[in-house]
Image (spheres, rainbow, N blue to C red):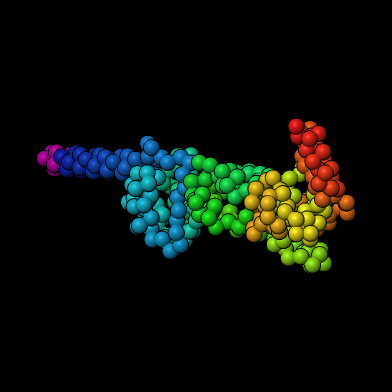
Amino acid sequence: MLWLVEKLRIYLSTITALRRKQAGLFALGFVILILLIWGFIPPRYFPVGSIVDVPEGAGLYSLSLKLKEDGVIRSPFWFRIVSIILRGERDMKAGQYYLSKPESSLTIAWRIFHGDEQIEMVKLTIPEGFTLENISSLFDERFPLFDHAVFEMTAPEGYLFPDTYFVPVTATATSIIKLLQENFSRKISPVMPEVELSGKKIEEIITMASLIEGETNNQLDREMVSSVLWKRIKLDMPLQVDVEMKTYEFQGLPEVPINNPGILSIQAALHPTTTPYLYYLTGKDGKMHYARTFDEHQNNIAKYLH
């Protein structure tokens, strides 16, 4: 009988120990689960609309600290753990990662290992005749990396092709200059043989096109104004172009373009219409009025401007 009581005691002790162990494991698992949930859910003030920059050769440790400092993750430790489980730091893809909505550490890590930048694109239209300052003003708060001062100091006026572009929100002044210049080169390439046949430098054609762009709004007038301005240059007469007062009283083309012309104004600069005119003006009626002589021009001023 005593041996039965002893076995029962041992059995009950074993059951109690197992229950305590299970309770301990359950408690430990619960704590770990809470830590995981806390570590992986997005921070309360997640920086929606910002950009995470992962530079080439960035280490996992330094990146995790930067993400924590920027408010992207809660726990650098758990971010490193899940990153190692996913792929390891060797597979991190350098780039700029756009944060359109709150995301967990797991999602952030997955995106970095897969190079999933999710950069938002913005449709921008640059009209013909826009200046550097006009173009710069298009890049508003949607483009946090765009440096207006750098753009306006370094971009080449006249050689930023007017067009519709899809621009990443990560665009910088340098990347936009490159984008617009490369488009200029593509669009101007088909007419380069004509430039060579004209006997003029491409810089002269683009500068003339910028004047035409600023003065006219239709192809007929573009080609007629081109004729007048080239003729005035040949005769050493002042250009008297209102859009750029520096050209009004002086002979010859400006040193640089005054805006960024479109392909139609470039073609007009290459192919002026043959006309007898030396003068023109834009009347209050919105139309261009041409004159052969100074006296005719004065009559047009009296008739269409007063």
The one of 76 and 63 positioned closer to us in this rendering: 63
Residue at the image point whose x is 54% and y is 47% from the top? 169
| Residue 144 pos. (x, y %) | 48, 46
Residue at the image point whose x is 15% and y is 40% from the top? 9
**Relative side of 111 to 84, left or right:** right
**Relative side of 225 to 95, left or right:** right
Q: Is residue 206 shown in magenta?
A: no
**Residue 197 visible somewhere in the drawing:** yes
The one of 2 and 27 positioned closer to us in this rendering: 27
Residue at the image point whose x is 40% and y is 45% from the top? 72
The one of 46 and 188 positioned closer to us in this rendering: 188
Residue at the image point whose x is 64% and y is 51% from the top? 246
**Residue 259 visible somewhere in the drawing:** no
Image quadrant in which the N terminus is located:
top left
Image quadrant in which the C terminus is located:
top right
Magenta span:
1-8
The one of 83 and 119 positioned closer to us in this rendering: 119
